Image (tube, rainbow, N blue to C red):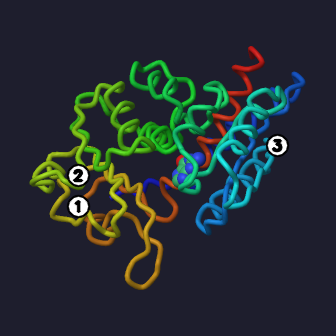
Amino acid sequence: MKLIDGKVISESIKQRVMLQVNELKEQGVEPCLAVIIVGDDFASRTYVNNKKKTCEYVGIKSLEFAMPETTTQEELLSLVEKLNADNSVHGILCQLPIPKHIDEKVILNAIRPDKDVDAFHPVNAGHIMIGDGTLLPCTPAGIMEMLKYEGIEIAGKNCVVIGRSNIVGKPMAMLLINASGTVTVCNSKTQNLAEITKEADILVAAVGKAKFITADMVKQGAVVVDVGMNRDEEGKRCGDVDFEAVKDVASHITPVPGGVGLMTVAMLMQNTVTAAKIQNNK
Ligand code: GUN
């Protein structure tokens, strides 16, 4: 078994981003990411801090807009519109979840597609489906980078994605389809799930259940990508895959922590630089 090391691969992406940042700065453009966080969700705070820290590392300017839980939809919309119109801001990210009294769709759809570094806007989702997206959803794009780095062929392979969210499962399926994989998308209601996962050459688990994928669900020699972010019964961080058991069956496997999560942030940096280039015709 070979460990797919998110630390090493995300570092290589960040180094690539740094070069692009320096090039843009030499041309008078300082890439800038605006991060909006509404309310005080603990996990969101951790993610936002991590995004800001990574911005600093690669030389991207970051602006944080922390708004109270009581923020109205109109207030949040007017901030998005202000950032849309600000030429010095290239990327806008609204950390999810947002409070329930605000319609998430209205906010995400208000972000200018060319500043939509999460690639959640329907325009960007459409480009991903057609296969000509420039801003790609960070987690699926990060997984594609991992597969590429490891020299894993996708064309002609059976790819099984478990999870059909708009953030991970659906765009992941699209990127694998565009790479000529034979793709099956499962969800929590799928019958005979193990029969399907056992056919996978490449298995992507985005279920949200700790250690859900057991060794008997994985084909010998499969590539296993774990998108999960859970806590086990002892409170330790773990993925959707029972790593200790599956590592003896898989040919390649991503760990949690130290896997896909690191790629997501690195790809956000790449998207911010890509957005800055597009907006400045570079
Ligand atoms: N919350 C959990 N994952 C994400 C993400 O990828 N982007 C944003 N904006 N919020 C999230």
Which element type, helix, strand or loop, lies under badge 3? Answer: strand
Which of these two is toward me, 237 or 77?
A: 77
Q: CA distance from mark 2 to mark 3?
A: 43 Å
SS class of the residue under badge 2? Answer: loop
The residue wearing badge 1 is 249
The amino acid type, in three-letter code, at marker 3 is: Lys
Q: Which residue is mark 2?
A: 221
Compared to residue 56, the image places residue 280 above or below, namely: above
Callout 2: CB less than 8 Å from ligand 1: no
User: Looking at the image, is mark 1 or mark 2 earlier in the sequence?
Assistant: 2
Could you say where residue 67 lies in the image, as x and y percent from the top left?
74, 56
Q: CA distance from mark 1 to mark 2?
A: 6 Å
Mark 2 Cα within 10 Å, few/some/many (few <14, many 20+)?
Answer: some
Q: Quadrant of the C terminus?
A: top right
Task: Identify the image quadrant of residue 117.
Answer: top right
For residue 59, side relative to residue 96 (left or right)? right
In the displayed structure, 129 sits above or below 232; it is above
Location of the N terminus by quadrant is bottom left
Q: In the rendered image, which quarter is residue 7 located in? A: bottom right
SS label for mark 1: loop
What numbered label is drawn on residue 61?
3
